[in-house]
Image (cartoon, grey):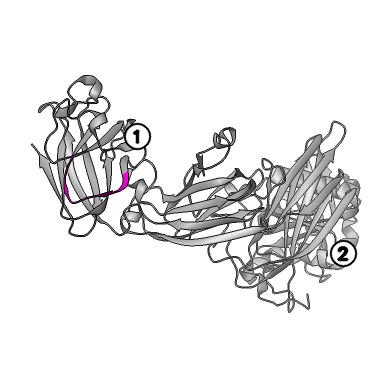
Amino acid sequence: LKVNGGYDFPGSNSGIDMHSLTGWIPEQFGTRDEGFNPERLWERLESASKFGDCLVTVATDEMSDAEADAVGLVSAHAYAVLQVRSVSGLRLLQLKNPWSKTRWQGAYSVHDTVRWTAALRSAVEYDLTAAMQSDNGIFWIDYPSLLRYYQGVYINWNPQLFRHHTSIHAQWPLRPARSPNDLATLGPNPQLSLSVNVSGDRAAAVWLLLTRHTTRKQQGKDDFLTVHVFKQRGGRRVYHLETCWLQGVYTNRPHCLVKFDVDPGTHTLTLALAQYKAVPHQVDYTLNVYSMAPFALRTLPMGLRHALHAKGRWHGIAAGGCQNYDSYIDNPRYLLTVAEPTDVLLELQCLSDSFSLGLDVDVVDGGETAQRNQFPLKSGTFRVGHAMVEARFPKGKYSIVPATFKPAQEAEFVISASSSAPISLVAVDHEGRGLVRHLVKGAWRFSDGSAAGSPNGGRFARNPHFRLTLSHQTDVLLRLQANNNPARPAMCITVYEGGERRSESGARFSNAMCVSNSGVYANFPGGVHVPRTALAAGSYSVIVSTFDPIEAEFTLIVYAAQGALRVQTLA
């Protein structure tokens, strides 16, 4: 208490004080808390009192002086519980005011001669006459009255009740700025693997006590801490709170107690220490684990051996949204190079809490066929603040695309790549870098015959045509999109020398100088494209088509050097 400057420090209560004096495990019940169960508390008090391996204290609510005088209690004050008794359906507790004076004036007080029958006095061995002679601060109170006037019940348990125990002492480093709170990710938090072996046919109790070390009076004001328990990761590091098996309750008190039972068998859990919000100072702590079954506890490493970070930004056309939108293709991209098979963790984080994020990974080059079959990889459901992909990567090169769920959501982000072997991570230039972007709108219509489909239908040449006129040699890239059509039809682009409409025979793929996707109709997110190709000055005709004849609007995007291109629709 001296370290905290007296009794008045954040989170102070009698259970915490008793832990400081005895080292016994503090458990707390708030009678005003949502979800409070008075029956469960009474069962707890009765069993605790019966076996004697605990110390019980209670604390009153804030009261006015007039109200406190009327009922004989002290406002916001702690009392010791001496006895807990059930007599003929009546629930009574014997309390002691540590001041050794000022006692309860209500039901079952020393002045309540009506309720204190001879049978009841005999049952609890209460000498009412002697109690009337002097006020020593000891009194009886019924359970309903206790629940009315007392807001906290504190039980300190003898740690020797548990057969197995260990503790660790550690430092909680400052949280990275890109990880502002646990709702985004638990990844940077201290975490431990707990393996519990429960023999027999009965579940075993496990208690976790997280204690914050206090070095100054106001330190705990903003330190809201807890422990979350995870099952599905098998003792490995966890990242997202929504996958938690048992969520602890955040508190700024010096102690946080999390209790659970483990069924028979061997269980490997992950314990994630958590801060509700990052604090601007280091937090020192002790974690005690008490268990009725044997267990092993180990601290999980903070990350893999190698770590790379790349900053980026969704901005302008580069804020393309998820794969539901053709503008997805304009998102920032990164190339991950893996020199040897290795475990890789990819994380995407954004300081904005307004956008849901996702991460896509696909093979660019390399890897055995069987290994490549696991790709593409996705981070799963888009979520605010953090997305991740974790896998074993074969040797090769991989494309990484970070995305917001919707287009035009602008923000800065950080991609982190951690691995057990060296890797490289570099930003990839946008496909149209250094070129000017030209947009041409059009449509496939049945009314004018332009919804003609593939060459299989015999009317391919009736599809929309465009003339590209180049004033000098330039790189050209073409991309065809179906204007975010949810059906996303399979499409193709064909490019021919000469700027005139093609006849049916002249429009054969064999006559084309460039065809998207090697001539295979496709419906990729972002549409289909003819890769960047150097074209000489002159005129070229372009046909855009769908595999099946359908009515749909489209956009043809053409990239070329500044001032080199003129695009015309051919009638």
Is residue 95 visible to us here? no
Q: Which residue is at a point 16% across and 34% down the rendered structure image?
A: 464
C-alpha distance separating marks 2 and 1: 77 Å
The crowd level at tag 2 (other Cα within 10 Å; few <14, some 14-19, many 20+) is few
Give the percent coordinates (x, y) of residue 60.
Answer: 70, 62
Q: For the residue labelled by badge 1, is the local secondary structure a helix, a strand or a loop?
A: helix
Q: In this view, does 102 lie above or below 442?
A: below
Question: On the image, numbered disc 1 is attached to which residue?
Answer: 518
Left or right, 228 with reference to 323: right
Q: Which residue is at a point 17% across and 59% down the rendered structure image?
A: 563
Q: Per the image, is 559 magenta? A: no
Give the percent coordinates (x, y) of residue 407.
Answer: 34, 50
Left or right, 344 with reference to 554: right
Give the percent coordinates (x, y) of residue 363.
Answer: 50, 42
- For the residues bearing labels 2 and 1, Cβ distance under 8 angstroms: no
- Please state which amino acid type lies under the numbered disc 1: Ser
Question: On the image, numbered disc 2 is attached to which residue?
Answer: 22
Say which quarter of the image contains residue 214: bottom right
Magenta portion: prevailing SS class: strand
Q: Which residue is at a point 17% across and 23% down the rendered structure image?
A: 459
Q: For the residue labelled by badge 2, is the local secondary structure a helix, a strand or a loop?
A: helix
- The span shown in magenta is 531-541
- Please state which amino acid type lies under the numbered disc 2: Thr
- Of callouts 2 and 1, the N-terminal one: 2
Q: Per the image, is 537 magenta? A: yes
The crowd level at tag 1 (other Cα within 10 Å; few <14, some 14-19, many 20+) is few
Quadrant where the C terminus sits is top left
